[in-house]
Image (spheres, rainbow, N blue to C red):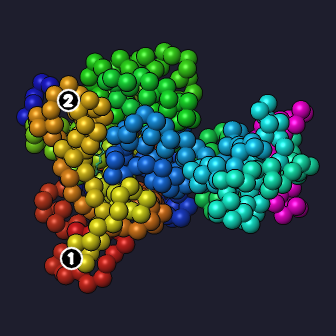
Amino acid sequence: QPDPFGFVGLTYDDVMLLPGATDVIPSEVDTSTRLTRRIRVNAPLLSSAMDTVTETRMAVAMARQGGIGIIHRNLSIEDQANHVDKVKRSESGMITNPVTTTADASVAEVDELCGKFRVSGLPVVEPDGKLVGIITNRDMRFVRPAAKATTKVHEVMTRMPLITAPTGITADDAMQILAEHKIEKLPLVDGDGKLTGLITVKDYDKTEQYPLATKDEDGRLRVGAAIGFFGDAWQRAGTLVDAGVDVLVVDTANGESAGEINIIKRIKADPAFKNVDVIGGNIATRSGAQALIDAGADAVKVGVGPGSICTTRVVAGVGVPQVTAVYEASLAAREAGVPIIADGGLQYSGDIAKALVAGAESVMLGSLLAGTDESPGDLIFVNGKQYKTYRGMGSLGAMQARGKKTSYSRDRYFQADVPSDDELIAEGIEGKVAYRGAVGTVVYQLLGGLRQSMFYVGARSIEELRSKGKFVRITAAGLKESHPHDIQMVAEAPNYRR
Ligand code: RVP
């Protein structure tokens, strides 16, 4: 840095986008973008890998809205992989690996599996995979609760011959069969009568309800998951891949650390991981971005200290205001063709367009989503108002959550070796955010705001927004003028809170 004090760090509140000539209206713009080198999404939004933000429900909701959720890693490997598995099974054009049961299992066991995977019935197979029947709610309805443990599947299941279809049937043809026979589940079988897949009517309903959903080639929702690089991180990565994860996010507070660079290189070199993309982060400089790109990252996540719950900039005195950080990182990333994710610090929908114009291709949100129904945790009431808890992964609460030996959250802050809870150095705080209802309505407002931005700038696509958008720097007086002023709000706005 030749002139340290001439190098100014700017953030969202320091800049505004210039309005310009436009021939598009908000409803016409296309908000699709690149998440990683290989994966596109219809909405440039990720939910943070935090234990008060993203587990199954959030990840499903985000993918349905066209974005993606990143399952946090303050969990055992098994629990985290379970979340991934549940998202992948939540809806799909075709389930390639359906949960099944056998004829001699009990109805109680079927009940348990149905509850666990949130399905209404299971194909029944022989040990070699041959389909022998199907058992659904309809078959189990008249089994008394007390008899469930002793009633066997073969006593109540619907037996072959069933309505089935051959492997490889098209979606439209399958839908026709479902409609013609008024059935909800269509097992797919190969020439030997072995079960190869399952198509359900529920999944078609979902496809119509969420046309922008982020899906893989098999029609399953996409999901990401966070890993670190200490301890059992390698095993975690492998287990997540086995569970079907689409993207791994190497999630540390300093992405330029030797450990992170090494694990990215190792993943990218291993054929077992050839179908997953890897997001590296976080960094906040051009050289940081370059280091992750050189290691092979498929996207680079930017943000050191901007998070609403983050105290890194105060505790360590380290960080770069986010608009400058994104811009600097993009100087390396644009050249390499690697997308940037702007992580943390977004307060309003207008900040999304600012992040994209500064150089990002998508944004990651914590506090804006933590107050929704789909985030983990219960509603809390304070003075009659509704809130949900939200905490930094570097807060004492998060770092202590899994005890001393099994370090998860704490190794994000490179404190896996700290011998006792009392000796941890927190880099985040614990708090609460206002309850905001369903993710769907929050994302609707965020994307709506982004569409307005694109209209003002005259951009039909995110790519066009990024190339056409221009900033003006504003002062504290300009920021004051930008917010409502000289008035007391008397009605709640759906997209504005002080
Ligand atoms: P925000 O959206 O401003 O709430 O920020 C969320 C981001 O903050 C996360 O995606 C993560 O990068 C970062 N974070 C999470 N925990 C902490 C911390 O404890 N310092 N920071």
Q: Report the quarter where the N terminus lies.
A: top left
**Label 2: which residue?**
415
Three-letter amino acid code at disc 1?
Answer: Asn
CB-based contact (under 8 Å), mark 1 and mark 2: no
Q: Residue furthest left?
A: 5
All told, the count of numbered labels is: 2
Residue 114 makes an appearance in the image: no
Residue 268 makes an appearance in the image: yes
Residue stretch in magenta: 175-197
Please tell me how crowded label 2 is: few (under 14), some (14-19), or many (20+) other residues with Cα within 10 Å: some
Residue 182, magenta (yes or no): yes
Residue 194 numbered mark, or none: none
Q: Indicate which disc, 1 or 2, sits on the residue closer to the N terminus.
A: 1
Residue 105, magenta (yes or no): no
**In x, y percent, where is residue 450?**
42, 58
From the viewer's perspective, is 17 left or right of 362? left
Quarter holding residue 192 = top right
From the viewer's perspective, is 417 left or right of 181? left
Tell me how far mark 1 sits from mark 2, CA to CA: 37 Å
Look at the numbered disc 2 and give the secondary structure of its residue: loop
Please tell me how crowded label 1 is: few (under 14), some (14-19), or many (20+) other residues with Cα within 10 Å: few
In the image, residue 256 above or below residue 433: above
**Label 1: which residue?**
383
From the viewer's perspective, is 411 left or right of 30? left
* Residue in the picture at 88% in, 62% down: 180
In this view of the protein, which residue sits in the foreground, 23 or 409?
Answer: 409
In the image, residue 78 above or below residue 201: above
* Residue in the picture at 39% in, 62% down: 372
